[in-house]
Amino acid sequence: MANGGTQSRKYRLQGAGLDLALPYLMLAPGLLIVLGVLVYPLWDGLRASTKVYRYGSVVADVGMQNYIKLWSDPQFLNSLWVTVEFVALSVTFEAILGFALALFCLREFRGIRLLRTILIIPMVITPVVVAIVFRLIYASDAGMLTAISEWMGGGQVQILGSPVKAFIGLVVLDVWEWTPLMFLILLAGLQSLPHEPFEAARVDGAGNWRVFADLTFPMMRPVLAIAIVLRTIDAFGTFDQVFVLTRGGPGEATRLVSIYGYDTAFKFQQTGYAAALFVTIGLVVLALAFSAVRLLRRVDAS
Amino acid sequence: MNSRLARIGVMSAVLAIVLLPIYWLVSTSLKSNREITQEGTLYPHVPTLDNYIRLFTEKQFGAYLTNSLVVTFFSVAVALVAGAMGAYAIARFRLPFAMERKVGLFLLTLRIVPPVVILIPVYLLMLKLGLLDSWLGLIATYTAFNITFCVWMMESFFREIPVDLEEAAMVDGDSRFGAFRRITLPLAAPGLAATAIFAVLVTFNEFLFALALTATPRAMTMPRGTATLIGRIDTDWASMSAAGVIGALPIVFFALLVQRHLVRGLTMGAVK
């Protein structure tokens, strides 16, 4: 088996006999599970999205009608808009805060390890529990904000009852939960930058701001872009936190597409329509991801 | 001196922002419902463990915890074995039509799609197979999700290990698979650990599929069970906060225990 000589390492590595089948044998278990549990349902979902269901059984075949209907459904359009607003606001704040904190922590100092340890907590806590934590902060009767306000002589604080405040409350939750991830990624990125340009700039007498604008930021752009893309894709699918915190309310103020789709499927039993909704969301996210990869490649090349 | 003051200021602000909400959760869980809603105290004046005891005696949190542990263990274990083998095949072999690369790209694509997209068809599938509200249904679903992730993460770990070592083992008479098992796998152990840790974290915390696929304490996981306490009108804050602590404690403890690997896993892919 090891007599392949110099001609091709690949031939030698692949060997003969049972070894020839080895790559396929090694790929098979994982692929079979994924095909059975993810891909077949995905295909099934595509089929379901062209049908109309009533009480769990198909009553009509409507082709692309479900997809067309989506774009004139005010509730869907609203949920899409709420999602875009939520993602844009949360990710922007997370990127700014995470970057600022990473810059701040770049120089090793006492306490940085403690800081990192503490910052892991928000992102590893079960999202459902994160939502409970924030309900306990916002609640008008048992909430931390109310308790603090009363302690200072004020009255009850209402957050989840008002559309605007509930939405902001949700963004705050997401920023609390995910800024640490931004921070960790960006800190790792900062630590991997070469030292020489910075030393040279210092020798030339560049101030903090100049160094940041001319060196740090341009050099960090790829890492920053990747971190933002990762978070954006992830935030688009946010479900747990909203489900527990507001259930989409008050009204439709915090109803993200995921929540609307879930309700359409399981509360209103419109399985086919909901399937079309989710297929659309999947395509949007994939398009987003692929155009982001394209963009990153171009940034890399230039 | 000035920068030191600023440092202390920022540090304390960050610590307060992260820890105060958690303090409030723990503190609420030690109060009675009366103290929570009517007195609005800043710390438990009459601390009690009743809320926790009630979770296990009246609300079946023992069952939820068992379900979570079983489901997490099996789905991560199976995904690690299947995923490591698949990742190795993709990292090392060159197949006709660049098949291995296409499979890799395909799995990555599946990973990018938000899980909620296939919620309905997975639900319909489990309904058809009679696997709703069972361990097996959840394990199958989580295993599949974990595989897409394990393959992607393990592949890069395998690529970092030099091929020469395997070749040497094969010169000494090992089979290809033997070389993988005895040489490459042990070398990739830290990567395997980081992958497993991340998979445990994600699986233990999963809520959406648990919500759709389970309905009774027979299969409900911790996050799913916790959500049953969330009332529409009257909220039992005491139970809910205790459930939050119980639900988060195992995973936070676990995460802090293995934090070095975790940081590597969380930031991997973004930074080399």
Image: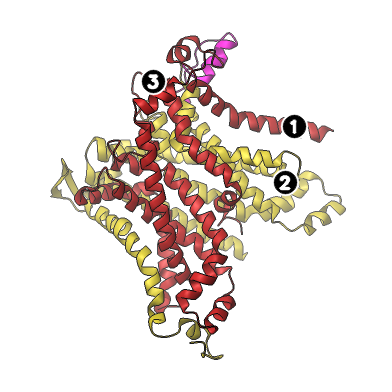
Chain colours: A yellow, B red
Residue A241 drawn at (x, y percent): 43, 35
Amino acid at pointer 1: Ile
Vertical side of A180 occupied by A195: above or below: below
Query: What is the residue that sits farthest to the top in this orientation?
Result: A153
Vertical side of A142 occupied by A130: above or below: below
State how far apart marks 2 and 1 are (Cα): 15 Å
Does residue A256 appear in this view? no
| Residue ID at (77%, 47%) | A210
Amino acid at pointer 3: Asp
Q: Chain of mark 2?
A: A
- Camera-side residue of A159 and B159: B159
- Camera-side residue of A28 and A199: A28
- The reply, left or right, for residue A175 in relation to residue A51 is right
- Which residue is tagged 3? B236
Magenta residues? A142-165
- Which residue is tagged 2? A106
Q: In the rendered image, which quarter contains the C terminus of chain B?
A: bottom right
Q: Earlier in the sequence, mark 1 or mark 3?
A: 1
Q: Is residue A6 magenta?
A: no
Comparing labels 3 and 2, the label whose residue is closer to the camera: 3
Q: Chain of mark 1?
A: B
- Is the residue marked by circle 2 packed among few (<14), some (14-19), or many (20+) residues within 10 Å? some
Could you tell me if the residues under marks 2 and 1 are in contact, i.e. CB atoms within 8 Å? Answer: no
Q: Chain of mark 3?
A: B
- Is the residue marked by circle 1 packed among few (<14), some (14-19), or many (20+) residues within 10 Å? few
Please tell me in which quadrant of the rendered image residue A198 appears. bottom right
Please tell me in which quadrant of the rendered image residue B237 appears. top left
- Which residue is tagged 1? B8
- The reply, left or right, for residue A64 in relation to residue A98 is left
